[in-house]
């Protein structure tokens, strides 16, 4: 089908989704982007946020903490540092993820403290976005 593309989402623990998708909304580190069939080749880093996959007219959302997305005209592969389906996100999981980001920020060398602060801010914002703050 010309209006769909292969989409794969993997984390270190498991393959989370492999499907034909019409659209993938990606929380890119340099800004959000939407990939569709025929998209120009791009590799981007992810920021913590919500990744949305549209397949057969249905949206499936995943919380991601970072990683990479490789986009080609044929499809999208997302290699997430950590990811869970939005339906599996709980206040406790979000609390743990934010606590880990806070620890990274607290223990960061001064030269990377700004990056750690951005990570922490994005984690808190993601929790607020999905109602788990």
Image (cartoon, rainbow, N blue to C red):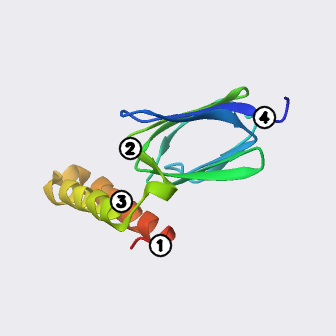
Q: Where does label 3 land, which residue?
A: 118
Residue 127, placed above or below residue 73: below
Q: Where does label 2 land, which residue?
A: 82
User: Where, by quadrant of the figure, is residue 128 drawn?
Assistant: bottom left
Q: Nearer the viewer, residue 58 or 98?
A: 58
Q: Quadrant of the N terminus?
A: top right
At a point 47% along the width and 72% down the height, the residue shown is 131
Alpha-carbon distance for marks 3 and 1? 20 Å
Q: Nearer the viewer, mark 3 or mark 1?
A: 1
Q: Where does label 4 land, which residue?
A: 4
For label 1, the crowd category at 10 Å Cα-Cα, with few meaning under 14, some 14 to 19 and many 20 or more, is: few
In the drawing, does residue 63 fall left or right of residue 76? left
Among the two numbered marks 4 and 3 on one chain, the one whose residue lies closer to the N terminus? 4
SS state under label 2: loop
Mark 4–mark 1 CB contact (< 8 Å)? no
SS state under label 4: loop
Alpha-carbon distance for marks 4 and 1? 31 Å
Label at residue 131: 1
Alpha-carbon distance for marks 4 and 3? 34 Å
Alpha-carbon distance for marks 4 and 2? 26 Å
């Amino acid at each position: 089908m010309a209006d769909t593309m292969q989409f794969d989402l993997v984390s270190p623990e498991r393959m989370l989704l492999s499907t034909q998708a019409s659209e993938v909304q990606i929380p890119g580190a340099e800004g959000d982007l939407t990939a569709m069939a025929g998209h120009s080749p791009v590799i981007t880093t992810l920021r913590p946020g919500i990744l949305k996959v549209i397949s057969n007219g249905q949206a499936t959302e995943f919380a991601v903490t970072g990683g990479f997305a490789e986009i080609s005209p044929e499809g999208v592969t997302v290699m997430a540092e950590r990811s869970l389906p939005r339906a599996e996100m709980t206040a406790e999981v979000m609390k743990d993820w934010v606590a880990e980001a806070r620890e990274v920020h607290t223990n960061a060398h001064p030269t990377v403290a700004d990056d750690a602060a951005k990570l922490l801010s994005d984690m808190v914002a993601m929790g607020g976005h999905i109602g788990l703050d």
